[in-house]
Amino acid sequence: MNRIGLIGNPNTGKTSLFNALTRSYAYIGNWSGVTVEKKVGQLINRQGSLTDLPGVYSLNPLSKDEGVTACYMLDEEPARVINVVDASQLERNLLLTLQLLEHGCEVVVALNMVDLAELRGIHVDAEKLSRDLGVRVVPVVARAGKGIDELLSSVSAPCAAASGDSESDDSGDTGDSIPVDYGPALERVIRETMKALPEGIKRKRWIAVQFLEGNEPVADWLRRRLPEAELLRLRELAEKVVRESGGSSCSEWIRQCRMARIKACAEACLRLERTAREPLSQRLDRLLTHRWLGIPIFVLLMFLTFKLTFDWVGVRISDALDGWMQGPAAEALNRALTYAGAGDFGKALIMDGIWAGVGGVIVFVPQIFILFFILSFIEDSGYMARIATVMDRLLEKAGLNGKAFISMIIGFGCNVPGVMAARTIDQPKERLIAILLTPLMSCSARLTVYSLFVGTFFKSHQAAIVLALYVMGIALALALAKLFAKWIAGDEPSVFVVELPPYRFPQWKTLSRSTWEKGKGFMRKAGTFILGGSVVIWLLSAMGPSGWGSDIRHSFLHMLGSWFAPLLSPLGFGSWQSASSLITGFFAKEVVVSTMNIIYAAPTEAGLGSELTRFLTPLQAFSFMAFTLLYVPCLATVGVIRKETGSARWTWFSVGYSLAIAYIVSLLIYRAGLWLGMQ
Amino acid sequence: MKLTDTVSGAYVRITRFDSVNAFVRRRLSDLCIAEGSVVTLLQTLPFRGPCVIGAEGQSVAIRRSDADNIEVEAV
């Protein structure tokens, strides 16, 4: 099988290229760190498989997601890689290319975004570059699909150099085959390191150089094969010879040698035209990262997002859908069931269980898609990195890092990818804090609960109330970050470096696909989890200790809710209905809505809304919404927290602290409201 | 002079870099920003917030405390 790796700097369009080269679809965004895990896809011509790897600047990793790429090169030993190079940042990108050449696998350079580079007056001569590096160079525009065929055919050809790597182990030091010459002194140490390596190891030169440069995954790999003392001696020797040659450190020396090599290469194949115009991105940034206007603009954009989702567009479509589903569609289904000869049990299960439970969630699909659409737009435009920048000071004060805000915003869509996006945070402890706090971000599933409640209780201020809940989530996250940072992070210095990619206008195709990919998860949940949950909840509501078909007040669901209800009454919603919806809501927060739809299987025309107003006051409803926002991450999020932290202790902690916070906050809201004279 | 003392938009060359946090230094070198690079201060955010620096057509945001440690000279 022809296995090919896809490697490049962050934000060079690897994922776009991956999508163009394979049948599968992966998630695209214009910010560093979109790909946090490797993904494998079939090439469209079925000539092999392609592995998309997290973007790296170097094979010597600094953070966890970069380590994935280093380990891939070390353990999987791909025979061939496609190295995506951003044509407008040639020199920087070549730092990685040189390391790939040292690795010895067959490299095909995909020179991407040549169109944007030309616009900026940067002309790269692909042929000269190819000759200089001794590899194939294919100019492409991944987003527009240009050059893809040529790239495909050049990577599908049988591996010409398949033998090259294994047999050339020792030829690493024979003159012209070395991509970079590190000077006689260091080269001697490199050769010595290569000799020390056990027999049968491939890619000796690459391993030696990476080790001396300070690559930790490579060093770990070597520690399993060579005595620690020997490794230490080699590193010290390298440092010593570098200092004798006038360098400051071995890694810096290696970098400078590579840069010198790149400068020579750039001179031959790079032509720059001075463009008088300031790049559009910089002009936009003068506004969007403006000293004083940056944060207000961000808050305004967020507010517009909620207005669009709740007031202007989303709610109208959802209401229309709801009317149709409860009216004509329900009637038609009822008639069809009667016609098909369904018994009372079957009819009740389908109408009161599945239709009420799943339908109650499905009506919010339009709103969720609008939110996902806007989030995709933000991700793809390049604004995400600016958000991290303008919010960094605030988050730094809270003991976090601007990048944590990216996790939080992604978490607005769904907490699961939000938790995963925390991988781009470089400091492990800051990362842990971001993971623990992302579930406080109000995700689209919770939106169903808010939509139901604000539509019922706060008709005239829907967007403002929902925005208040989102802001509450963020405010609590910041306050807790401060606490956690003291307790977890100790004195670890916080760092923040973020690249601000050029803005681009998202393509309609990418936007619609990425909205659909995110929304699909929601639909899938509706078809599996929520469907199953609705059936179980309906059965629990129709069965009781006394048997089948008993009144709901003697059902198992009632019993379950009644046990927990007294605990919740100080918060203002101590009814068994609220308690049982919250319990079932742990599986997925939308299930809160499904459960309510089933419990209040509304006999009246006005539906669930009017039933709810009989049981709750607006103040109690707000307290309930706050509790729903905070009380526990949903099952899927708990799963991903477990995976990302690798610790059961922290997973339990995230469940426990959020429960405590939810209780305290709802209690405060309810008591303060009562004290202020609200009902 | 320090990078943060320069006028926004003026091009300067980095002369000293060693007192910058090691992690930040490494990341900036990955972006080809090191001693000898020509950079410019594009934007500073209030309350000693991050600085956006431009170099070779790219923009990078770093913390103010790190930017304060970058010594530069006029080009």
Image (cartoon, helix red, strand yellow):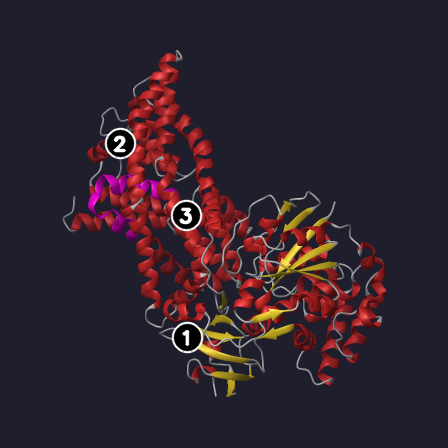
Instruction: Indicate the secondary structure of the residue bearing disc 1.
Output: strand
Q: Which sits in the foreground, A560 or A323?
A: A323
Q: Name the image quarter holding residue A242.
A: bottom right
Q: Pointer 2: what residue?
A: A608
Q: Around disc 2, counting alpha carbons within 10 Å, would you say few (fewer than 14), some (14 to 19), or many (20 or more)? A: many
Q: Pointer 3: what residue?
A: A372
The spot of residue A189 in percent (x, y) is: 79, 74
Numbered disc 3: what chain? A
- Report the amino acid beneath label 3: Phe
The spot of residue A143 in percent (x, y) is: 54, 54
Number of numbered discs overlaid on the protein picture? 3
Q: Is residue A54 above or below residue A58?
A: above
Q: Residue at x 36, y 40 (%)?
A: A366
- Can residue A36 be seen here? The reply is no
Q: Earlier in the sequence, mark 2 or mark 3?
A: 3
Residues at marks 1 and 3 on the same chain? no
Q: Residue at x 67, y 61 (%)?
A: A217
Please state which of the two labelled residues, at mark 2 or mark 1, is closer to the viewer: 1
Q: Which mark is residue B43?
A: 1
Provide the residue span drawn in magenta: A443-468
Q: Which sits in the foreground, A655 or A318?
A: A318
Numbered disc 2: what chain? A
Is A329 one of the magenta-colored residues?
Answer: no
- Report the amino acid beneath label 2: Leu
